[in-house]
Amino acid sequence: MRVALTDKFTVLGHTDHAPLRGMQSAMRYKPSMSAGDTQIGAFVLGMHATGLTAARCLGREGISVKGFDVGAKRAGFRSRYCSAEVCPDPLDQPDALVRFLRHQVRHGSQKVVLLPTSDAFFLFLSRHRVQLADKFLMNLPSIDVAESVVNKRRLYELAAANDTAFPKSYFPATYDEALGIKDSLRYPAFIKPYWGHQWRAHFGGQHKGFKVQSPEEFLGRFREVLASGHSALVQSYITSPDDNLFSLSLYLSQEGEVLAAFPRRQVRQYPPNSGTVTLAISERDPELVADGTRFCQSIGYRGIVGLEYKRDREDDKYKLLDFNPRLMLSDMLTAYCGINLPLLQYLDLTGQRPAPRREYTEGVKWLDSIADFHAFKQYHERGELGVKDWLNSLRRARVFALFAWDDPLPFLVDRKFGFSYGRILAYVIKDFLQRKFAPRRSASPTTRTV
């Protein structure tokens, strides 16, 4: 018998008012499942914003959640929906982490659900599944697939073998090989890492790669990459506007059935053109769902996944950019619109056979406010987005990276109890005064207002 998931937050077809009622009612949230259904506990590995999303999605259902990460300053440590603890590093101290997790369940008779929310924790679980299998419940693809989807070169090789479009890519391993392809590249081009989590640790948390405009800039940046010790590829840069970026969240059961699919448009990102989503909106997109579903099933993927695409205006095709074997940053939007991915995985792993979740609310916006402000500043300084259009695009944002009415502390601490927004107010006032008392600068906006 399948378990039917009810929509806690929204009423389909009422996107203007139902989400607001959902946020308000979240302060009085009541689990819809009986205690017997949720008696098995869950461990969330990684307590950044994605881990916070997982903790909220499970904790609101009455599931006992423990969270773990390598540093106590992560946002999820302050959530009311989990108890959190510092743990060994999944890549630098994997054996210690295996012992740590087994110690956490030493007195329990039931297996515990494990949910990774970062690439590092995903790889750790995949590589140590045998040592953990007698104590924990996990939904993972094969070891080979797990390693391939996190490694960009192997990901694109999988895409090529399974007829999934991606930007034209080259894989130089030495400076001489880079010299050999510099005149074959179409500029602008983009240098990106094989291993994103290692790259971000070296170059910075939101750094996805280098956009280069010429052969000379490419060679200079590639020399810098070689010096860092990180393997990287270079690919054609899709010059479509940033609001041609899309993402798709899926859940594939242990049997490989797609139980849920949720597409959205990524309106802005930071840094612009090559960063992390800051404003997204739920949309209906059967073509994207079909493409992502076909690819994930063809490679034998299992579990939660977030795919990132950009529509290339030259051939009007979606091109696969990235594969996230976990929750995505904006997956609180997924839950708000009616598809609770962590709960689906929990029910699947605990033998409760959740029913497929096909419906969701369209037109709902998700916002990472501080990051979106930094993105706006760059768009604005390039003459691509005015203050008024930016503020209008934020209207009716219903879901946020950290803020939740029923769980405010992660947001309040991270945003310094509101003081972080002083910079936004000062910038808007300064811009207003400059426009009022100085000659106007002509601008031709190239980003869509939503």
Image (cartoon, helix red, strand yellow):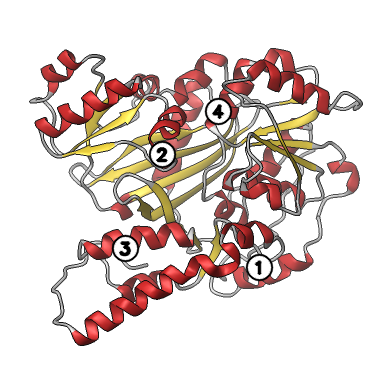
Which is more N-terminal, label 3 or label 4?
4
Q: Position of residue 422 (x, y in %)?
A: 47, 71
Which is more N-terminal, label 1 or label 3?
1
Which quadrant, please, contains the N terminus? top right
- Residue 120 in view of the camera: yes
**Residue at mark 3 to residue at mark 1: CA–CA distance:** 29 Å
Q: Are marks 4 and 3 in contact (CB under 8 Å)?
A: no
**Numbered circle sitting on residue 344:** none
Q: Which residue is mark 2?
A: 204
Q: Which residue is mark 1?
A: 23
**Residue at mark 3 to residue at mark 2: CA–CA distance:** 19 Å
Q: Give the residue at the far bottom of this rendering.
A: 437
Q: Position of residue 285 (x, y in %)?
A: 42, 50
Identified at 15% across, 79% down, the residue is: 440
What amino acid is at disc 1?
Met
**Residue at mark 1 to residue at mark 2: CA–CA distance:** 33 Å
332 lies above or below 342: below
**Residue at mark 4 to residue at mark 2: CA–CA distance:** 16 Å
